[in-house]
Image: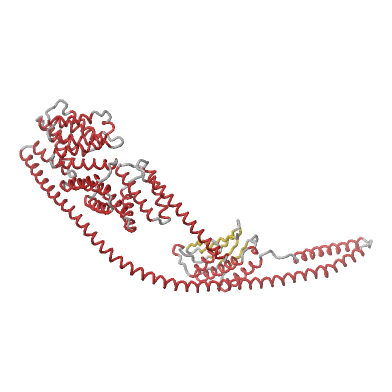
Amino acid sequence: MNLKFFFLFAFFSFVSFAQNDTKSVIDSVEFYLRYSNRNYLDAAFRLDNALKAKKLTEAFELDSLKLKTYLSLADIYFDNDKNQKEEIGYGHEAFLKNAHGALKLATKLNDSLALAAANKNLGYYYYDYSIDSAYYYNNKAEKLFRALDDNFNTAVVLLDIAMLQKSEKDYTGSEITSITAISLLDELNDTDAVLRYKSYLYNNLSLLFKELEQYEESIDYNLKAIDIKKRLKGNNEELIDNQKNNLANVYKNTKDYDLAIKYYTEILSNKNLKSERPAFYAVVLDNYANTLFLSEKYDQLPGLFLEALKICDSLGDSYKTIVINQHLAEYYNFRKQKDSAKYYAYRAKNISYPNYTDELLDTYLLLAEVESDSVAVTYYDKYIKLNDSLLKNERAIRNKFARIQYETEQIEKENIQIAKERMWLIIVSIVLVIASFLVYVIIHQRNKNRELKFTQQQQEANEEIYNLMLTQNENIEEARTLEKKRISQELHDGVLGRLFGARLSLDSLNMGTTPEAIDTRGQYISQLKTIEEDIRKVSHELNTDFVSGAGFIDILRTLVETQTAIYKLNYTFNHDGSINWDNVPNKTKIHIYRIVQETLHNIHKHANATMVKISFKFKSNVIYLSIKDNGSGFDTNKLKSGIGLKNMNSRIKEINGQLDIVSTINKGTTVKINIPTN
């Protein structure tokens, strides 16, 4: 009963420890994720925390937290790449790897929120690289967020879709999408984030109505956007200036030049604008100069145009220079300075071609005005041809968006049906797998029991063989000891006694006074003393015990002598006398014996050797066994794990040893084994 209680206590203690350990890991992961998701921190610091979180989730197989690390890493790499920073290196491949990893894991875990977030991230990424892919992922994200009743994130994704539609001139689609997003945000409380995205949506509406030349609506949405941006927390001067520039552009298009100049002047009145935002300063300066030109105020021209152009050229921003070059061409054409007009018009054309088709279209029309005769006609024809091509492309894009949306819906319906079919297939498969697993477990357990029984029998046989060997060796040693004692006693009590008596007799005869007699007897007595000392030395040596543990070395030496004689091998056998084999466990000695036996067998079978060197050394409580042959050798990279090698590895593992095989073709093989004794 006490034993049962002990096992129950141990089991619940282990479970409690495992739970506490897992909780500690989860706490660490969540700690790292908190710092990785703080956008205001250094990118390298955020990345370091995210990677630490990922490493822990992979080590402990915490899939739900691993999914969060994928999303966090994708955000970090995307933000770093978007802001063109270099703190953590190139982010495209790293972003895609983590974004698709999140997509795959979210699908596996059936985590709709994470799935929506992963699609949203991919939609943002592809906005600058592939319109089709961006629309595809955003469309999927929008449907997932709608299903979750997440109005805010649905509106955020709809903004991205609306901007895609506007960039492809699907103005009607963009308007509908923007209004839908605004209506979703209207249902939420006016938090700073909600107001911020409302202002972005109003800005998108203002831009597309400007393109549609519905200027009153554009002005209305610009004013709404400015009003909201003034209510946002923090310093939003940049956002407000951007919006004022958009509004001034609309007023310029309506020919309300005074209002346009008013807003441009407000923006340019910021003394720090040129140093803090030189590219934006150049754009506003060009718009202001163009408005002055249109309002027939030429005093500051073309100086303002040229200043704006110089700034953009110094920044290497060729795209922004297209419009400035066009404005300069228009100005010089108005001034009848044809050479200058052509210079800037052609410069605009060269920059526009082939990537900026809208700007190239305007430049063709400008060149048709600047040039004369057949050249002007040629550029007008190019204008018409490119315009027709753009119209066809816009229609194709609109159709493509519709097709992508339709195909996405069809795929979702098919996925639902496939999911049902898969569910039944999984149920049947699980039943079959469980049944197969149970059969396998039963068969495997039976085989395991047999294997364990065989191993136990083999171990008992090894122990019995070794004990018999030790017993035999002890009997031999006992007989040797008895024989030594007998000889010692015989020498001491018999021969030595007689010699001692003879010495006394001779000593008594030494009373003779003649020099010759004295000298002769002295020589005999000296010789008898020498014999006496030699016999006493032999007696003591015979009566000394053998070195402790010599029995096991004798057993090994006998094995080596027997095996090498059979295999026709020459050998050397060296051992360190400092090894106390009596303190080495019997199990270890059995395995050493078997390893030597197996190695000699392998040398005979595979090496074609004529010489083998076996040595034992002892250092720092470790026995170093080395078996070296002069055989054919082999490539250790192609070493096959046969039964003999498996047995050897198994024995070495049981005694916590280490095996190292060094071999060179045609130069032999050395087997090195390290065996700890404690």
Give the quadrant of the C terminus.
bottom right
Residue 81 horizontal side relative to residue 288, left or right: right
Q: Position of residue 156 (x, y in %)?
A: 26, 46
Q: Nearer the viewer, residue 123 or 572?
A: 123
Residue 156 horizontal side relative to residue 663, left or right: left
Q: Nearer the viewer, residue 661 or 195?
A: 195
Q: Position of residue 355 (x, y in %)?
A: 19, 44
Residue 152 horizontal side relative to residue 625, left or right: left
Q: Residue at x 50, y 59 (%)?
A: 14
Q: Position of residue 95 (x, y in %)?
A: 32, 49
Quadrant position of residue 595: bottom right
Q: Is residue 128 visible?
A: no
Quadrant position of residue 288: top left
Q: In the rendered view, would you say 283 is above or below 47?
A: above
Q: In the rendered view, would you say 196 is above or below 525?
A: above
Q: Position of residue 72 (x, y in %)?
A: 35, 48
Residue 599 horizontal side relative to residue 335, left or right: right
Q: In the rendered view, would you say 571 is above or below 64?
A: below
Q: In the rendered view, would you say 318 is above or below 578?
A: above
Q: Is residue 621 visible?
A: yes
